[in-house]
Amino acid sequence: MIKKVVVLTGAGISAESGIKTFRDSAGLWEGHNVMEVASPRGFYKNPALVLNFYNQRRKQLQMVSPNIAHLNLVTLERYFDVKIITQNVDDLHERAGSSEVIHLHGELLKVRSSIDENIVLNWNKELVLGDLCLKGSQLRPHIVWFGESVPMLEKAIEITQEADVLVVVGTSLQVYPAASLIDFIKPNTRIYFIDPQPAILERNFSNLTIIKEVASVGTSQLLSLLVD
């Protein structure tokens, strides 16, 4: 009997709300080299550029809404204990109504001290040079940048180990360490992989079902498979 459903989500689920995916084919993020705007070195080199970059991402987030895929995952909670582990930094899962969401890569609507990662503040306005934490240090986006540890990874592993069903939607499982979570499931855990171009093979997993659809369509099919 299915009790616990763990859902790993990525950029593909938010793309249908109008949020652009992380990088384009040239390796750029909104026209910037990702290391300029998503690394401690980039922040040290040009903090004003980095702060403005995330200010624009924050503005974009406030102009979009959760889509059917987000809402379908909320519907799953009527039947199962659902926990979401997301690589996304947006708050669309929360706004849709999901009860428990783990953000592996940080949250766009939060900021933190640049000298004490435990000082985290909610933030839905612009962040500029001169915005300081209580210790007098510049505030920075609460985002896990390249080269930084993933503080929520251990909790995500614990949750994944308890799953009766693992759903992967909107991510190709190419970004580590998030991609490694699939290695921590129990041997009999059922896997549903939702992606229009799945980068995974059924023969590699004994309990794998591939749904070759975008997130909104695929999660609707998932509901039918798990609930009916």
Image (cartoon, rainbow, N blue to C red):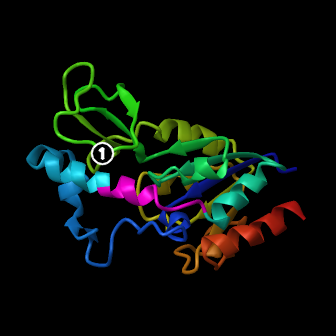
- Give residue 182's quadrant in the image: bottom right
Q: Is residue 178 left or right of residue 213?
A: left
How crowded pointer 1 is (Cα within 10 Å; few <14, some 14-19, many 20+) is rated as: few
Q: Name the residue rendered at 54%, 36% in the picture.
A: 155
Question: Residue drawn 15% across and 46% down?
Answer: 47
Q: For the image shown, how many numbered marks are present on the structure?
A: 1
Above or below, 198 relative to 150: below
- Residue designated by label 1: 126
Give the extent of the magenta segment: 56-66
**Whole-percent x and y of residue 206?**
70, 66
- The picture places residue 200, in percent across and down from the top left corner, at 56, 73
Q: Is residue 41 visible?
A: no
Q: In the drawing, does residue 80 fall left or right of residue 166?
A: right
The quarter of the rendered structure image containing the C terminus is bottom right
Q: Is residue 82 above or below residue 158?
A: below
Residue 197 appears at what percent x and percent y?
54, 80
> Would you say 204 lies left or right of 44 here?
right
Q: Amino acid at mark 1?
A: Glu
Furthest residue in direction right, as rendered: 228
Residue at 42% across, 44% down: 109
Report the residue at 56% width, 58% height from top. Answer: 9
Nearer-the-camera pick, 30 or 150: 30
Residue nearest the observer in this picture, 194 or 141: 141
The kind of secondary structure element at disc 1 is loop
The image position of residue 27, as x and y in percent, is 27, 72
User: Can the viewer see residue 95?
Assistant: yes
* Residue 191, quarter of the rendered image: bottom right
Q: Is 41 in front, or is 46?
A: 46
221 w.r.t. 124: above or below: below
